[in-house]
Image (cartoon, grey):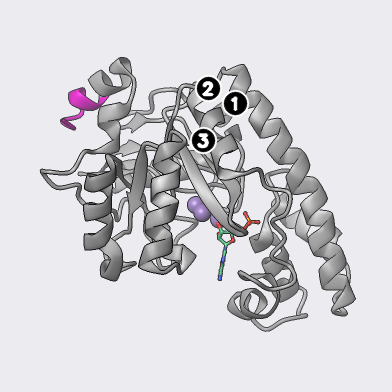
Amino acid sequence: MSIDLHCHTTASDGVLSPVALVERAQAMGVKALSITDHDTVDAYRMLPRSPDGLVLIPGVEFSTRWKGVNIHVVGLDVDLDSPALAEALARQAAARESRAEMIARTLEKQGFTGVLAGAQALADGGVIGRPHFARYLVESGQVSDHETVFRRWLGAGKPGDVKAMWPPLDTIVAEILAAGGVPVLAHPQHYKMTATKLRTLLGEFKLCGGQAVELPAPGQGAQIEASLIGLARVLGLALSPGSDFHGPGAFTELGRTPVIRAGSVPVWSLFSASRQQALAAQGIA
Ligand code: AMP
Ligand code: MN
Ligand code: MN
Ligand code: MN
């Protein structure tokens, strides 16, 4: 049995369709699943509210900015019909459109061609992001591999890492709360922060209304796991298990998430009463 509260579909930069993703989760024995596409909840329009054998928890992964760093915040158990959510997503969509144009201009200045149309075609009507640009450059034969694109042009601090249009962290946290959701700081191990900076980030996140932090999947941040568990306890943050699965064959796998041990507060204890009842029916306390 596993619980996976962070993954992606073709509605953003994932490889599997929402239906295929839920089927994979069912096959792998995932009992509670949240699809958290980047800045969209469109996957939920293609799924039943209660697929067989698992509890589906509406979620989304928002892009934000904090001290010049692109920080991701997952909103879990959000109300999909909330006007606050719709408003936030509309603004993020507009930001992604203008950002995509800026990324394309930046890459064309480096000599690449056909960039915007190529990335848009790969996004195929879903939310466009840097992985679509990377895939386009590789598939059109302009760069040898995905990793090289990120290392040289799109990764943190590179010219194509455009983040100026993302709203501040506290704005997104407030919007998730207004949409009835639980704000979760995503994948803290990815930000490559010093322990002091990470503590400051988590402290500020808590102060502005943040409620949980993700715990790295086994093998993806073992060095900071113990300190995260401790920090979460001191700050009064719950823990959330999420794989950040984007597709088969990559370094993460759906349902491969850490167990939240006794003594820590699991994020689902903050979900709505009806959601907690559904989880209890699946044997999740
Ligand atoms: P965006 O949403 O446009 O900011 O793109 C962020 C996404 O790019 C992440 O969610 C990952 O899927 C992917 N990504 C970020 N950094 C890397 C990297 N260094 N190598 C491969 N993929 C990455
Ligand atoms: Mn992604
Ligand atoms: Mn992320
Ligand atoms: Mn993610």
The residue where tag 2 is placed is: 178
Q: What element does badge 3 sit on? A: helix
Q: What element does badge 1 sit on? A: helix
Q: Is residue 66 above or below residue 196?
A: above
Image point (32%, 67%), residue name: 221
Determine which of the numbered discs, if any, sits on residue 85 in the image. 1
Percent x, y for residue 117?
85, 58
Q: Is residue 202 magenta?
A: no
Quarter of image, res 115: bottom right
Quarter of image, res 107: bottom right
Q: Is residue 258 visible?
A: no
Q: What element does badge 2 sit on? A: helix
Pick out the residue farthest to the bottom.
144
Percent x, y for residue 148?
63, 81
Question: Disc 3 residue type?
Answer: Val
The residue where tag 3 is placed is: 173
Range of residues picked out in magenta: 279-285
Q: Are marks 1 and 2 in contact (CB under 8 Å)?
A: yes
* Mark toward the start of the polypeptide (1 vs 2): 1
Quarter of image, res 150: bottom right
Percent x, y for residue 99?
78, 53
Between marks 1 and 2 in the image, the one whose residue lies nearer the viewer: 2
* Mark toward the start of the polypeptide (3 vs 2): 3
